Amino acid sequence: MQNLKEKIQKLKREKNALILAHYYQNDDIQEIADFVGDSYYLSKIAKECKEQTIVFCGVLFMAESAKILSPEKTVLLPNIEAGCTMADMINGEDVRELKKEHPKAKVVCYMNSTAEVKAESDVCCTSSNALKIIKKLNSDEVIFIPDKNLGEYINEQAHVKNMIFWNGFCRVHEFVNVDEIMDIKNADEHVKVLVHPECNREVRKLADFIGSTGEIIDFATKDNCQKYLIVTEEGILYSLKNKNPDKQFITPKTPMTCCSMKKNTLNDVYMSLLNNQHEVTVDENIRQAAHKCLNAMHEMTR
Ligand code: 13P
Ligand code: SF4
């Protein structure tokens, strides 16, 4: 009797499919994936890969972005309930209103947004390239949606004269308890604190390093400290520990778990490959407009 992981590998070969997984996915999914990465890296792989079928183990906006970039490919999201609450905090109508209020502003949307919101925006960004993109835009007025924390963090460095924010945030990162971080820092002065920019300012102030999931892993891998406090979703620990077996990684006392990311199970991946479920589709008019926004990001970060 073949185990589930073997069955997935066999089906994947038969269907010439590629399995992509975000760093927040369950360990067993990261283990069987062809590529594991942050949202920017995965969108590049999805755009450039030769395979006709992509099983995107992440959340809907990630799979949707893959479909927008490669409409000819079949993009599957193993569990259709894997959404992102931050992405759902703003819709296309909200963006149109903002544009009416600030007609001269450039609109930069975080990758964590719906296709409809991307379609209304000038350029997309992720936390690993947002600063580069804002600097290249060189605009005095920027509407940054939907993550107020990432926007604020970027503008501490980019100093756009008028950056207009939306009150969007990620529940996993917004409600990190500052005292829990302080307790760990006070107990051990050698621990380095690595923080995702979706965290609020009070938490960012305590960081030794701030970066995307991929950048946090790179930093910990190249740095010569022994112990790190990881202030982002706990799924990242799988790749961190794999790449750094001799280092110690600890987390805040209150778990940082993205329930949406954890919706995808290994069995969902198998069923997804077996039955082509759940195929992600995007309305063609929206897709074309959203493609311009995503493509602008890839062009500006080349
Ligand atoms: P990254 O771009 O760092 O992978 O982050 C995506 C995300 O959803 C963070 O909550
Ligand atoms: Fe969305 Fe937050 Fe989950 Fe990232 S961690 S996918 S921003 S809900």
Image (tube, grey):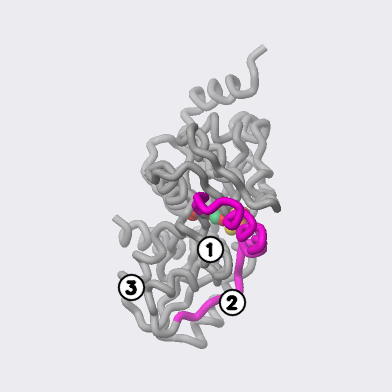
Q: Count residues near mark 1 (Cα–Cα under 10 Å), then give few for <14, some for 14-19, many for 20+.
A: some
Q: Closer to the camera: disc 1 or disc 3?
A: 1
Which residue lies under the disc numbered 2?
94
Q: In front here: 96 or 35? A: 35
Q: Which residues are magenta?
A: 163-192
Q: Closer to the camera: disc 2 or disc 1?
A: 1
24, above or below 270, in the image: below
Which residue lies under the disc numbered 1?
206
Q: Say which amino acid is labelled 1.
A: Leu
From the image, which quarter does the N terminus lie in?
A: top right
Mark 2 lies on a secondary structure that is: helix
Q: Count residues near mark 3 (Cα–Cα under 10 Å), then give few for <14, some for 14-19, many for 20+.
A: some
Distance (Cα) linking label 2 and label 1: 33 Å
Q: Earlier in the sequence, mark 3 or mark 2?
A: 2
From the image, which quarter does the C terminus lie in?
A: bottom left
Distance (Cα) linking label 1 and label 3: 30 Å
Residue 238 figure quarter:
top right
